[in-house]
Image (tube, rainbow, N blue to C red):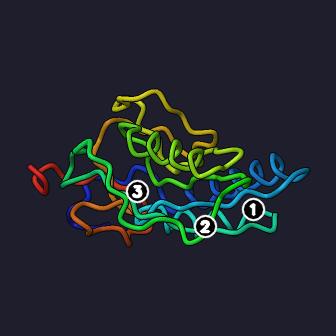
Amino acid sequence: MNKNVARILISEEEIVKKSIELGKQITEDYKNGKAPILVALLKGSVPFLAELIKHIDLDIEFDFMDVSSYEGTESIGDIKINKDLDRSVRNEKVLLVEDIIDTGRTLKTVTKLMKDKGAVDVKVVTLLDKPERREVDIEADYVGFVIPNEFVIGYGLDFNQKYRNLPYVGVLKEECYK
C-alpha cells in the first residue's frame, strides 16, 4: 500500500468484479439496438474504461474528452474543455465513462454538450459515485460503487496528477492535502 494512503476503500479485485457486472448489464441493455459510443473523460476514467470494455460484448467504439473542473482537492466550478471528441456523435448513442461523480457539474455540462452535438441518447457509467457532494441534479445510469465523502485516489483518480496508477481506490491521508 502506498505510504500516503490512509486505507484501501475498494480493492482491485472488487473493481474487476464490478466491471464484469457492469459490462454484462451494458451488453444486455444495448444488445437489441445500436451499440453506444463510449466517451471516456480524461484522465481519470482510463483505467476504468480499459477494464470495462473487456466485459462489454458489443461492437463498440470509444473516444476521449479532456474536461477539468478541479484544482487540488476542490471542484472550482469552472468547466474547461481541453480536448473535444475526434468524431461526431450526431444520431449516435453515447455512454459517458466517468471515474467519479462528485458535485455533478462536469457530468451535467458534458451530458448537455453531447445532446447539443446531436446524440440521440446519453447515458453515464461511473466507477464511483459520491452523492453527498452533489450540487446539481444528475445521476449515473450505471454505478460501480457509492462512496462516502472522502478524498480518494488510485485507479485513475489523482491528487495533483499523482497516484492515478494505484491498482485500487484508496483514501488519501489528510496531511497530504491540508
The circle drawn on residue 143 is none
For badge 2, the amino acid type reads Glu
User: SS of the residue at dot 1?
Assistant: loop
For badge 3, the amino acid type reads Val
The residue lying toward the viewer, choosing from 144 and 118, is 118
Left or right: 162 in relation to 157: left
User: Residue drawn at (13%, 57%), measured in percent from left and top?
Assistant: 176
Q: Farthest right residue?
A: 32
The residue lying toward the viewer, choosing from 33 and 28, is 33
The circle drawn on residue 56 is 1
Dot 2 corresponds to which residue? 51
Q: Nearer the viewer, mark 2 or mark 3?
A: 2
Q: Position of residue 77 (x, y in %)?
A: 26, 41
Q: Residues within 10 Å of mark 3 (few under 14, many from 20)?
A: many
Q: Quadrant of residue 162?
A: bottom left
Q: Residues within 10 Å of mark 2 (few under 14, many from 20)?
A: some
> Of label 3 and label 1, which has the lower sequence position?
1
> Of label 2 and label 3, which has the lower sequence position?
2
The CA span between labels 3 and 1 is 22 Å
> Of label 2 and label 1, which has the lower sequence position?
2
For badge 1, the amino acid type reads Ile
Q: Nearer the viewer, mark 3 or mark 1?
A: 1
Q: Position of residue 170 (x, y in %)?
A: 35, 55
Dot 3 corresponds to which residue? 169
The CA span between labels 2 and 1 is 10 Å
Q: Position of residue 63 (x, y in %)?
A: 58, 68
Q: Position of residue 23 (x, y in %)?
A: 72, 56
